[in-house]
Image: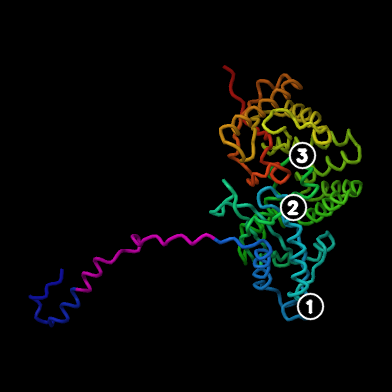
Amino acid sequence: MIRCRNNPRLMWRSCVLTLAAFLWGCAAPSADTQPTPPPAPPVQPIPFDEAVLKAANDLFGRAQLSAAGADGSAKNILVIDPLIDGVSGAQSVATRSMEVRLVELVKSKYPRFEVEPFSTSTVAKSPIVLVGTFTSVNKEGKTEGVREAYRVCLALADLKSGKIISKGVARAKPEGVNTTPTQYFKDSPTWAPDQATEGYIKTCQGTKAGDPINPAYVDRILTAALVSEAIDAYNNRQYREALDLYQSALHSPGGEQLRVYNGLYLSNWKLGHRDEATQAFGKVVDYGLVNKRLAVKFLFKPGSTDFWADRRVTGPYPIWLEQIAERTSQHQGCLEIVGHTSRTGPEPINERLSLLRAERIKQKLDRDVPALKTRTIANGVGSKENLIGTGTDDARDALDRRVEFKVVGCRAPG
């Protein structure tokens, strides 16, 4: 304690100043009690074209290039690994249009880069790879609830250094955005978490400049180039070529991935190879069972548990159900069959409808393999676990109306 009166060595002015400093020090808040700063204001979405340009200009303008191409004496080879939805991994009309815009921008404004096709031959040159995700998000930027904007994420991955050399992000308004899946992704019958796709997404969304490229992505990039060529061939109705490319991808490092199994099924089905297509769908089911989760895009009539009446859509369903039943019966463990709906309509009705649809699928599996009756349970979650969340009720959000098969532990009898 400071005593001014009894301290003749201190002048009154000095004593007052000392006492004031002491009292201020006592009253000042400590670092532990400092008020929490307010959260940053939410990113305001801008029109789609503007958002793409903003993210792209930030990406290319901030790129830390090697000396070989920085002074203009040599160009940096740039390839674009097709942009995808940041949750489902699907390519769409929107992501394709973004790629076209990126190529145009590089050619007109960033001569340090030379764009080449994404192929095994160009990947072998260790180029700079552009990856990007386009994801529907809510007001808080999360992939849940009502989606009100799209988050654009772009990244440049330098295969020579193994590092991320630049990032670009923006938020786009939903108006005028066409997220209809390209043909391969529209036709793909199943979805499941996949290490190759997750590695791609993490390379874009889970990194900053200077970070290493995600190992799951870089270890599979040669196979990714083959898969990309196969998808392009399928989209162009070149099914024989697509089948050959998918088979090559399957036997490449990291080729045992869902995009390849779906592609083998689809290409064989389009070529009329029914036995091969059935076997390929069985491999799809095996993949899901090993990874304990597989979503299947069964199309139901609105508000009903009956399948859509168009045989061009539902014709393969008996094969799918048969393979799910047979492969599950050979696999240890039990299945939880989970129904999902889009977010349109009252949620109590959605929950009830999703449960009824799951129960309908369970009945069909039990009929094909009666032993499954005690190894399957049905559940419905309505729209609580939407992957897309746009509520369009068409091809764009078909995954939100999926039926999911999850491997769970079996309950002890009794």
Instruction: Determine which residue is flagged by label 2.
Output: 92
Is tag 1's residue or tag 2's residue first in the polypeptide sequence?
1
Percent position of residue 341, x then y: 64, 37
> Residue, x 74% and y 49% (percent of image)?
180
Marks 1 and 2 sit apart, C-alpha to C-alpha, by 34 Å
Identity, as a three-letter code, of the amino acid under mark 2: Ser
Amino acid type of the residue that numbered disc 1 sits on in the rendered structure = Ala
The relative height of residue 179 versus residue 302 in the rendered view (above or below) is below
Q: Is 359 displayed left or right of 11 in the figure?
A: right
Say whether marks 3 and 1 touch (CB < 8 Å). Answer: no
* Residue sitting nearer the eye, 215 or 17: 17
Image quarter where the N terminus lies is bottom left
Residue 398 is a magenta residue? no
Q: Which residue is mark 1?
A: 74
Residue under label 3, please give it. 189
The answer to whether the residue labelled 2 contacts the one labelled 3, judged by CB atoms less than 8 Å apart, is: no
Point 21% across, 69% down: residue: 23
| 64 displayed left or right of 25 | right
Please tell me which residue is depicted at 81% across the width and 33% down the height of the picture. 310
**What residue type is disc 3 on?**
Pro
- Look at the image and tell me in which quarter the C terminus lies: top right
Tell me which segment is drawn in magenta. Answer: 20-42
Does residue 50 sit above or below 254 in this rendering?
Answer: below
Q: Residues within 10 Å of mark 1 (few under 14, many from 20)?
A: some
Query: Residue 63 sits in which quadrant?
Result: bottom right
Q: Which of label 3 and label 1 is nearer to you?
A: 3
